[in-house]
């Protein structure tokens, strides 16, 4: 029986030894990311430009949907309050049933 390793093994240990022994391990294609990092500047700029374009494209849609939803909520205030209350009670009952099921082992 082999004893557990004294430290957590990382990818650099996979090609050097089998866990807990001095035997050579299998030759696995483990990338050496720390030794040869990719340049981060160009990729970060591309990601920033992509996120900016995404934000500028979705902002008008989100604004108009929010404006329309607030108008509907204002018009049907009483019904939306009732629906929100019923939904909150249903979620609470569901959570209690799930918690009891987990504690008592219900299927």
Image: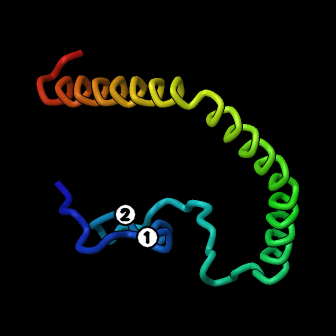
Q: In the rendered image, which residue does mark 1 sit on?
A: 10
Give the CA distance from mark 1 to mark 2: 12 Å
Q: Residue at x 51, y 27 (%)?
A: 78
Q: Which residue is mark 2?
A: 18
Q: Is residue 21 left or right of residue 34?
A: left
Image quadrant in which you'd find residue 77: top right
Q: Crowding at label 2, few (<14), some or many (≥20) Cα neighbours within 10 Å?
A: some
Number of the front mark, 1 or 2: 1
10 Å crowding of disc 1: few (<14), some (14-19), many (20+): few
Residue 44's image quarter? bottom right
Total numbered badges shown on the rendered structure:
2
Residues 60 and 69: in front is 69
Nearest the eye: 66 or 20: 66
Residue 87 lies left or right of residue 71; in this view the side is left
The answer to whether residue 19 is above or below residue 32 is above
Residue sitting at x 48%, y 24% = 83
**Quarter placement of the C terminus:** top left
Q: Is residue 105 left or right of residue 55?
A: left
Q: Is residue 102 above or below residue 50?
A: above
What residue is shown at x 36% (from left), y 23% (from top)?
Answer: 90
């Amino acid at each position: 029986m082999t004893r557990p390793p004294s430290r957590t093994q990382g990818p650099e240990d996979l090609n050097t030894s089998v866990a807990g022994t001095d035997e050579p391990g299998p030759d696995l294609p483990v990338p050496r990311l720390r030794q040869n990092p990719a340049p981060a500047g160009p990729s970060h700029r591309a990601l920033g430009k992509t996120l900016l374009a995404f934000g500028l494209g979705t902002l008008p849609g989100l604004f108009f949907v929010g404006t329309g939803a607030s108008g509907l909520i204002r018009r049907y205030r009483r019904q939306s309050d009732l629906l929100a209350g019923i939904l909150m009670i249903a979620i609470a009952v569901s959570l209690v049933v799930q918690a009891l099921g987990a504690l008592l082992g219900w299927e």
